[in-house]
Amino acid sequence: MIDAIFRWLESRCDPFPPETPAKPPTTLTGFVIHYARPFWPLLLASSVMGITIALIEVSLFAFMGRLIDWLATTGPENLWAEHGWFLTGMGLLVLVLLPGLKFFYNSLINQGLLGNFAMRTRWQAHRYLLRQSMEFFQNDFAGRVATKMMQTALGVRDTVLKVTEVFLYIIVYFTGTLVLFGSSDIRLSAPMVVWLIAYLFVLRYFVPRLRKVSMEQADFRSVVTGRVVDSYTNIDTVKMFSHAAHEDTYAREGMGDFLDNVYRQMRLSTLLTSILNLMNGALLFSVATLSIWLWTQGAVTTGVIAFTIGLVLRMQGMSQWVLREVGNLFENIGVVQDGIQTIARDRAIVDAPGTRPLVITSGEIRFEDIHFNYGKQRHDVDNIRSPGVMDGLSLTVRPGEKIGVVGRSGAGKSTLVSLLLRFYDLEGGRILIDGQDIKTVTQDSLRAGIGMVTQDTSLLHRSVIDNIRYSKPDTDLDEVIAAARQAHAHDFIQDLEDLSGRRGYEAHVGERGVKLSGGQRQRVAISRVLLKNAPILILDEATSALDSEVETAIQENLFSLMEGKTVIAIAHRLSTIAAMDRLIIMDQGRIVEEGTHQDLLRRGGLYAELWSHQSGGFLAGEAAE
């Protein structure tokens, strides 16, 4: 029975809705309501139940006062005869009804809200963030973004629950107390009214300051997390330069600012608690003194003294609880407001209304007068506009053509590829694949039609087979092994074993693939692209991390993979692309030369200069830069 109730409440709201999440509002109220909307029925039910419980608890103090009066005026032999039914009803209320109500109330909170609310918010926020542009993630720490996503989910949940719980309890308890005091003697309400007014003034003074400190604290916490994660993520660089002490200082600076903020918060909390203790003492003294004086005047009974003092003691505990909860509430509000700045951002790259899937028939690629400079206006010292990263470049790659792209660092080679994949939007011109403007097709279909191997290969912290299958998730093991053999990765994969004892293709590769060498990571990445078998292939220094013997073996498989595909290959080692159908030489965002390897050497231009400067397979001029 109880398990059935739990399961029913846990299934009231799907924590993983399949709908694509929309951008949340940027205002605090709108942001919270956006994520709380699916839980309103449960929140309403818990509020009604919470009000009922609070009313019953307040009424118990009045019952205790009445019971004391009965004990003082009724003999033992007549107590049950005169008040038995009432006493029995109160017994059932305390033993059955109140525990039952609290069970259902706690079930609503614990089973219906606490788990699903935070998880649903995380799910939706994560899915929205995952579809942000490359620039979004390049401008922030990955650990900081993840921390804000996790903290904000809890902050939204706790903000909603504390608002509904705290303020309902405040309203019921304070209102109930005033009504009970006034029904006994209106004069008993005076100390309570004065205390309540003073309490509100104290909150009015301290809460905004606590709110400001809490907002700052959320940001300091994120900064510390980001700095620590940055050190851990780049631990190889830290070890290489023996900079553990430097990283200590870097983390300590962030932690020091965080601690200063904590000190300010604790000072405010101590002052607030001290003032509240003084107010509570004054309230207890004034109510006790006034009720005793009224008793001496015959205006109230002994029971009234008992329940007023008992209720004041309860109110003192409540005021401390409300204080803590209000402090936590504004701490959560600070976390949420800090998270809004990260989560509720517009996406820089979006699919326009009416976009359709890309259909690749032949693989022709056209760059038409494209301009791009990462959204910046570049000016030299004379305030004359200098060329952008891409400055009026036009290029047509014919169906099935294999071109090599060459140029010094900063010429725009990798940017050209990023624009083709629509990691960024053009500032002028357009890019077409088989006559379709890439801005008019869905991003998923665009990238599904392009296979790419980069120089800086990072793998997911999952198994080898998961990493290879990432390009084609439904592939069976035989196809995965075949792709790994083509990339000369099968032999070393068989020898892998992780700390959990998983071996071979099931072994996990560590964060960003750190458990593999650079060459091994590259071969896994090549396996992934071989498996994808997309009609357009991009190779950005695809074999740079490999030794010469393995590179020569893999080149044979890459050339077979290129058959029938449109290929754009970027390489610093010109020997790896000299056999391409055409070479494109770039400089300062423009194409300055194009032709075959032999044609370009005969012209004696930039390509011939770069070729003559090669030393050990690399561009000496680029190394000098």
Image (spheres, rainbow, N blue to C red):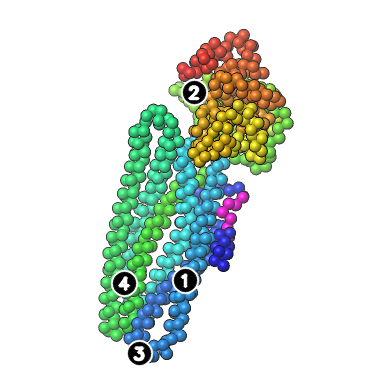
Q: Position of residue 502 (x, y in %)?
A: 54, 39
> In the image, what residue occupies the spot 36% across and 85% down?
70
Q: Nearer the viewer, mark 1 or mark 2?
A: 1
Query: Label 1 to label 2, Cα distance in Å?
Result: 78 Å
- For residue 262, the mark is none
Few, some or many C-alpha atoms within 10 Å of disc 1 (few <14, some 14-19, many ≥20)? few
The quarter of the rendered structure image containing the N terminus is bottom right
1 and 3 marks in contact (CB < 8 Å): no
Residue 434, above or below 192 = above
Q: Position of residue 172 (x, y in %)?
A: 43, 70
Q: Earlier in the sequence, mark 1 or mark 2?
A: 1
> In the image, what residue occupies the spot 37% across and 79% down?
64
Q: Which residue is mark 1?
A: 99
Question: Is residue 577 located in the magenta-colored stretch of the structure?
Answer: no
In the structure shown, which secondary structural element does the residue marked by tag 3 occupy?
Answer: loop
Q: Position of residue 388 (x, y in %)?
A: 53, 25
Can residue 391 be seen here? The reply is: no
Can residue 535 be seen here? The reply is: yes
Q: Amino acid at mark 3?
A: Gly
